[in-house]
Amino acid sequence: MTKQPERPNRPVLSLHVPEPSARPGDEVDFSHVAIPPAGSVPRPDPHAPAAETHPLATTLVRVLDDAGRAVGPWDPKLDADTLRRMLRDMMLVRVYDDRMYRAQRQGKTSFYMKSTGEEAVAVAAAHALDRDDMCFPTYRQQGLLVARDYPLVEMMCQIYSNRRDKLKGRQLPVMYSDRAHGFFSISGNLATQVPQAVGWAMASAIKGDSRIAAAWIGDGSTAEGDFHAACTFAGVYRAPAVINVVNNQWAISSFSGIAGGELTTFAARAVGYGIAGLRVDGNDALAVYAATRWAADRARANHGPTLIEMFTYRVEGHSTSDDPSVYRPKEAGAKWPLGDPVERLRLHLVALGEWDEARHEQLAAEIADEVRTAQREAEKHGTLVSSTIDFPQDVRTMFDDVYAELPWHLREQQAQMVAELEAKRK
């Protein structure tokens, strides 16, 4: 190794490595989180120049105050039926997550990822978008499917990779796909969703369609090139897209500061691309709804994309393969200062006089029964273990759905495999 020359009068260089405010064994410290009062952030006109939104990229759009009241210019003034439906959808997602988590621990599936504490990010957005808008989600937006009435049994069959799995076991559990419900195939490499969403949005505009695209990406994935390429295209061509950065503070075990979260907000990246940017309380269902509807209206008016940072917290582990207690305090999720999105919406309905404890308990019981019934039905078609033993997959399907026209060499292999299977049966 070449020895560096001595420079006695120059300071020694050093690098900064971002660190979270607390590690295991430390007291949870969220004192650095700046939370403006609900209703204090102005709401620009959806047709305003993108630059007018840029001050909103470093604050926080909030609607629900501590008493559960909807205040300020971002209040979407939703009717009680819509609010109750959003509450039901979020509660259903949470119960479904708990059921599938236990199923994984029982060996019925290989893998699962919960969205606990982030339910509003998907559910409220789904209610704000049109049903035929195309969503490009990550693996924590199962609420999109729930809000669009996708059958729980079909979701569970995908988790179990059983014989009724429409994806035929070719996707990891939780990586759903359903074109009819506007749910684009999930990719484990999250950043790829954004350029695909922008491309889809551009194609929609080229065709003279009226549908827009919405994408979700984690805070960590914003450090990848795909994200930045997508933002460039979206800005340059004014693609009708809503780009959601779900900042839940952790990219698996990496603190969000590693992706640039200490330098500025993730919403502030909109400034460099000249596109609209909003930073939103992701645990406030009304704020998520209002911001998404604002961005969707802007996109449909051909004013281009909006980058929304959904500021939230990943309450539990990254997945069933992760133990968050090794890199953060155990009680961190419970002490997140923006609270629980389900409880906050419940409190709002109570404050309106449109909800009470009796109805809440009844709904919780109905949802629990609905999820149990769906699970029993799904397991009739097999689970991870029983699909192998009692419900073996037809291995011939491995050649299906890969090519529009099967190449000659694969046709030969398929014929050879079928012949060998027939010989074994004899």
Image: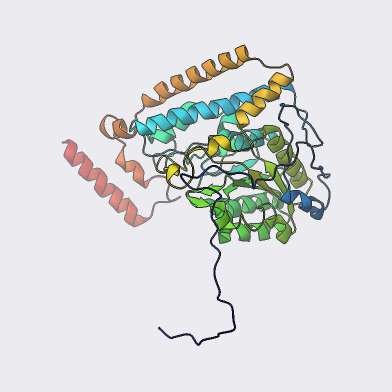
- Name the residue: 30% across, 30% down: 386
When the figure is inspected, residue 134 is found, relative to residue 98, above or below; the finding is below
- Camera-side residue: 163 or 231? 231
Residue 151 appears in the picture as rendered: no
Image quarter where the N terminus lies is bottom left
Residue 36 appears in the picture as rendered: yes
- Name the residue: 42% across, 43% down: 322
Query: Hey, which residue is sitting farthest top in the picture?
Result: 358
Query: Hey, which residue is sitting farthest front in the picture?
Result: 8
- Name the residue: 36% across, 27% down: 381
- Camera-side residue: 346 or 263? 263
- Camera-side residue: 334 or 345? 334
Report x, y in % for residue 76: 77, 32
In the image, taking residue 398 as reference, residue 133 lies left or right, namely right
Report x, y in % for residue 384: 33, 34
Residue 286: name its quadrant: top right
Residue 209: name its quadrant: top right
In the image, taking residue 160 as reference, residue 198 lies left or right, namely right
Image quarter where the C terminus lies is top left
Report x, y in % for residue 131: 65, 34
When the figure is inspected, residue 197 is found, relative to residue 92, above or below; the finding is below
In the image, taking residue 112 as reference, residue 87 lies left or right, namely right
